[in-house]
Image (cartoon, grey):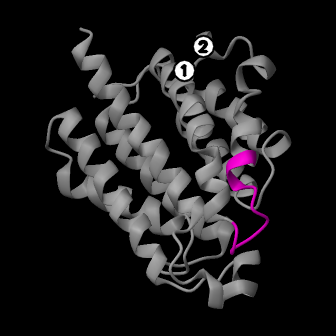
Amino acid sequence: MGFTNHDIYRVFTMYQECLMVNCSLLNKLDVNLSNRDHGSNLNNGFRELFTTFPDFKSENLSTQFSNLSFLFTYKVKGATSPIYSYVCDKVSEYLTDVDVIERDMFGQILKITTESVKLVGNCKLNDKTILDCIYAAEKSFEENKNENTIRLMKKISVDCKLACDNTANMAANKGKARHNAIYSVGVIDPGAYSLFLFFDTLYKYVLKKRRTK
């Protein structure tokens, strides 16, 4: 493993495309939970990433995540935006003077993300939030960190998907969705699903990168 600033640029380029494809699905998942706009909020916000920050590709890792924090603060609407803004700010601090995200650092970023989501989201496991997904990613990393990069990322993606699917069995306890808790059972949490899509994009990127070497 070893993610450079160019890798981060390519990952978020692919994630942009993923959000465009899955925008309607994410909105549909949001119908009974909030404002039916989770997909649109992410898609519209991320479409502005490279126009707002035209030098994103060449920026260092810390600056890239600082840019993402800004994006979530001012360009991406929705309840998860303040959480992700805080996460990206903390990751930016952690990556100061770092040129390559090595394996152990990736694991630490997952821990930073988990703790930040708990803090800002004021949530716990099984509240039907993005925490259920990020916790699964952190746990999967710890259990599979000695695997090669492709197997590791595939396992994280699979475990995140399982965690997302499991949110359908939960009643919402946080955000606007808690007001429609009775209707939330049977529906996957859209925030957890969009985070799964990111980890799945990360897996597809490392797979594509290996095949093109």
What's the residue at 56%, 68% (across, down)?
189
The residue nearer to you, when weighing 91 against 204, is 204
Residue 32 horizontal/vertical position (percent): 69, 75
- Answer whether labels 2 and 1 touch (C-beta < 8 Å): yes
Judge whether 13 appears above or below 21 on screen: above
What's the residue at 33%, 49% (across, down)?
157
Answer left or right for 171 relative to 82: left
Q: Quick one: SS at disc 1?
A: helix
Is residue 175 in view from this perspective?
Answer: no
Residue 163 horizontal/vertical position (percent): 38, 67
Disc assigned to residue 9: 1
On whether residue 98 falls in the magenta region, the answer is: no
Answer left or right for 68 relative to 189: right
Q: Residues within 10 Å of mark 1 (few under 14, many from 20)?
A: some
Separation of residues labelled 2 and 1 (CA atoms): 5 Å
Number of marks in picture: 2
Residue 105 horizontal/vertical position (percent): 38, 39
Amino acid type assigned to the residue bearing label 1 in the image: Tyr
Amino acid type assigned to the residue bearing label 2 in the image: Lys
Answer left or right for 157 relative to 48: left
Q: Which residues are magenta?
A: 31-40
Answer left or right for 47 relative to 134: right
Q: Quadrant of residue 71?
A: top right
Residue 53 horizontal/vertical position (percent): 75, 19
What's the residue at 70%, 33% (across, down)?
46
The C terminus, quarter of image: top left
Q: Quick one: SS at disc 2?
A: helix
Q: In this figure, which residue is indicated by the disc labeled 2?
A: 57
What's the residue at 70%, 44% (across, down)?
42
The N terminus, quarter of image: top left
